[in-house]
Amino acid sequence: MKSQILGTGSYVPERVLTNGDLERMVATSDTWIIERTGIRERRVVATGQACSDLATEAAQQALKHAGVSATDLGLILIATCTGDTPLPSTACEVQERLGATQAAACDINAACCGFLYALAIADAYIKTGFRHILVVGSEVMSVITDWTDRSTCVLFGDGAGAAVIGPSENEDGVLSLHLHADGHYSDLIAVPCGGSSCPPSEKSLAERLQFIKMKGNETFKIAVKTMEGAIREALSANNLTVEDVDVFVPHQANIRILKAVSQRLGLPFSKTVINLDRFGNTSAASIPLALDEAVKDGRIQRGSIVLFAAFGAGLTWASGVMRW
Ligand code: UT7
């Protein structure tokens, strides 16, 4: 039995932070940011707005779109690395807010690959007999962003995207998902302190170790290679070629990464759904945000072959193919 996405939803906070705003905060320029990343603006939460707030809004939309009631959910998975608190999980907060009284709930942390990891778990549970599973990617990257570090603060944004998964009525749906990780590269993208290996202290706060650090250049090169490899793996597992792909929904880190990946594969760039120009890198939220947009504006139609690929901290990388 295959699983299918029955409905999608998304939410971004109202506050827009433009490249012009960043020019007033750090030594950067609109031209540099657009040329090096493709990002023009990003959304940032209002004071007090948390990961669960974004996730709940996106989830409510997805449930409505799917025509599924919250009480029909058997499992809620929230992909995030910026949950409300270390305990309890953000998923339990979302379960309460939705009134999803029958659902088990937990968070999944696979950084920018979180949505595809969570989708793979949902797919496996649907095969065991679960009827309806909510998968959400929700991130408040602005809380782990160092707004004094120009090498990272221009990149990230906040947002959430959601999907309701259920059993497919035919042979359409998730064709395959491919998950990878290599902890050898854990230092390329990391928030060094705030967890059990380095609990928050005056020293760690003074050194700003509660914020994301990234070796951007090295990460860039590995991102292109691993995403290309994961896509080839997904296509070959389903006897598909790039010509068969109707829509490519990738993780949105940098437009130059996406162009390089498309070029290496011979995949026309016009098939790529882009939202990083408006939302920046929203980590686990970027794929479901882009997916919702492409579903709602009609780029994805029943029968469309949809290709996914992601790359992020861990390192993790992943890909997948669906027939919508
Ligand atoms: O989602 C998780 C996965 N993340 C990624 O995949 C991110 C991958 N990496 C990237 O997207 C890119 O490496 C960045 C956008 C982060 C950086 O672009 P780059 O072309 O690799 O720049 P760079 O780090 O090599 O820096 C080039 C120059 C440096 O100056 P010098 O040393 O050449 O004088 C930087 O100091 O650009 C400078 N620079 C900036 N200048 C203006 C770095 N950040 C900025 C900035 N504004 N914001």
Image (tube, grey):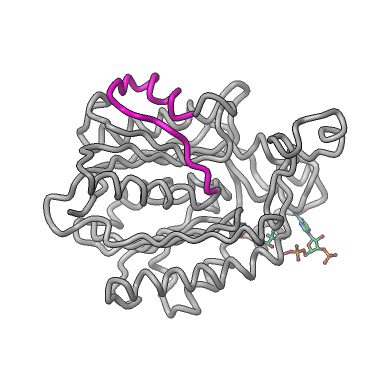
179 or 49, nearer to the observer: 179
Total marks in image: 0
Q: To which quarter of the image does residue 247 belong?
A: bottom left
Would you say residue 85 sits in the magenta stretch?
A: no
Q: Is residue 48 left or right of residue 135?
A: right
205 or 183, nearer to the observer: 183
Q: Residue at x 27, y 61 (%)?
A: 175
In this rendering, is residue 217 above or below 60?
below
Q: Quadrant of the C terminus?
A: bottom left
Q: Quadrant of the N terminus?
A: bottom left
Q: Residue furthest left?
A: 170
Would you say residue 108 sits in the magenta stretch?
A: yes
Residue 99: % across, % down: 32, 19
Residue 70: % across, % down: 27, 26
Residue 38: % across, % down: 60, 59
21 or 79, nearer to the observer: 79
Q: Residue at x 83, y 35 (%)?
A: 204
Q: Is residue 44 left or right of residue 10?
A: right
Q: Is residue 148 left or right of residue 84?
A: right
In this rendering, is residue 287 above or below 78?
below
Q: Residue at x 49, y 38 (%)?
A: 138
Q: To which quarter of the image does residue 137 belong?
A: top left
Q: Residue at x 66, y 63 (%)?
A: 219
Q: Quadrant of ligand 1?
A: bottom right
Magenta residues (range): 90-110
